[in-house]
Amino acid sequence: MLALAGSAPSLRGQDAPPQRLPPIAEQDLTSGLQFEHGEPHKVVDAVGWVFGIPKKIIVWDRRAVNHHVSPETEQKLAEYLEANGLVSTKVRINEYDPFGEWQRLRENKEVGAGWRYTFGAFSTVVYTVLPGRVFGLDKYNPYTDSIYIYSDIPCLAQEQAGQAKIVQARPHPGTYAALTSLPVVRLWPAKQRKNEVLDYTLAFGTAAQQEEATRVFYSEFGAEVGGQASIFLGSNLPLTLAGAGIGHVAARFKSMTTPEPTAPDGGTASTASQTNKPGPAETITR
C-alpha cells in the first residue's frame, strides 16, 4: 500500500500543457460503421448492472457499468478516436457479438498470428463464454482491435481508446499486449493510458470534466494497485477497496491544490473546450 500512497498523487506526473490539436468541425462522429450498438434488454442489462456494483463502488459513480451509454459519452469517445487517428478500431456499445469478434481476430493482421491464436484466442473465448454484456467491464481487446463500452462515463470510454492508441504505437503490438497483460506489469499501461486521457481532458475538456477524470482515474488506479498487491498479500477485496479509498483522497488533494486550467489566450479551459475541438492526431513515432 506504500507504493500506492507514493504513486497516486503523481499519477499525471508533470503538469506541462499537452500539445494542442487543430480544430475539427462539429459533427456526429458515431453514425458510421465504426460504432455498433447492442439492442436494449431489460433483464440482461439489469443483471449486468448488478455485476457492475463493485466498479460503481470503486469509482463511487452509479454510471459505471450501468449498460446505458448516452449519446454524449459516445460523442466524447468518437472525438478522441478522431483526434488520434484510430479509424480502424471497432467500438461495441453494450453489444455482444462473438461471431464478429472471431472474424476481427482472424482479420487483424497488425498483430502476429502467433499472438492472435494464443493470447488472442483465449481472450475471445472468454468474451464468448462470459459475455461482457453481463459480466464484463469497459475494455480494449488488442487482438481484435475492439473497444467494449458498458459505462456512461466519458473518461472511462476514452481510457480504452487511450489503450488502443498506446498498443498501436508499438512496433510489435502483439508482444506488447501479451507482456503488459501479466500481473503487476499491467499497472504500467494502466497508468500510461490514464495520463494520456488526463492530458487530453486538460487540453480540450472543462474544469468539471478534468475534475471528474481525476476522481475516476485516481480511485481506479488505487484499486488496481491494491488488487495487484493482493497477489502477494491475499485478501483481494479489502486491498482493492483500500486502494480505491486512497485514490479518492489523492484525487481530492489534487483538485484542491491544482489551479483551474487556462487556455493559451488566457481564457478558461471550458472556453477552450468549446472553441478548440481536437482534430487529426500527429503521426505517432514508432
Image: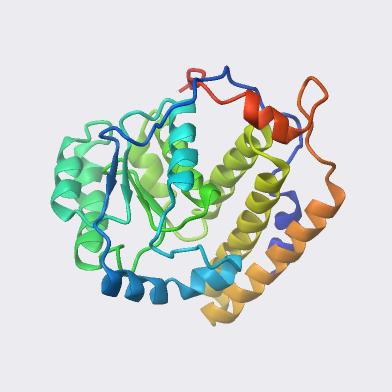
What residue is at 53 percent from the left and 69 percent from the top? 56
Residue visible at 48% across and 18% down?
Answer: 283
> Which residue corresponds to the image point at 59% horizontal and 63% vertical from the top-left?
225
Colour mapping used in the image: rainbow
Position in image of residue 182 (x %, y %) = 43, 56
Left or right? Give the position of 113 relative to 52.
left
Q: Is residue 84 visible?
A: no
Q: Position of residue 80 (x, y in %)?
A: 49, 34
108 displayed left or right of 17: left
User: Is any atom of residue 112 visible in this view?
Assistant: yes
On-image quarter of the N terminus: bottom right
Q: Is residue 116 above or below residue 216?
A: above
The quarter of the picture where the C terminus appears is top left
Residue 121 versus residue 16 in the image, above or below = below
**Where residue 115 sits in the image (x, y, percent)?**
25, 44
Q: Is residue 211 above or below residue 169?
A: below
Query: Looking at the image, is 130 positioned above or below residue 255?
Result: below
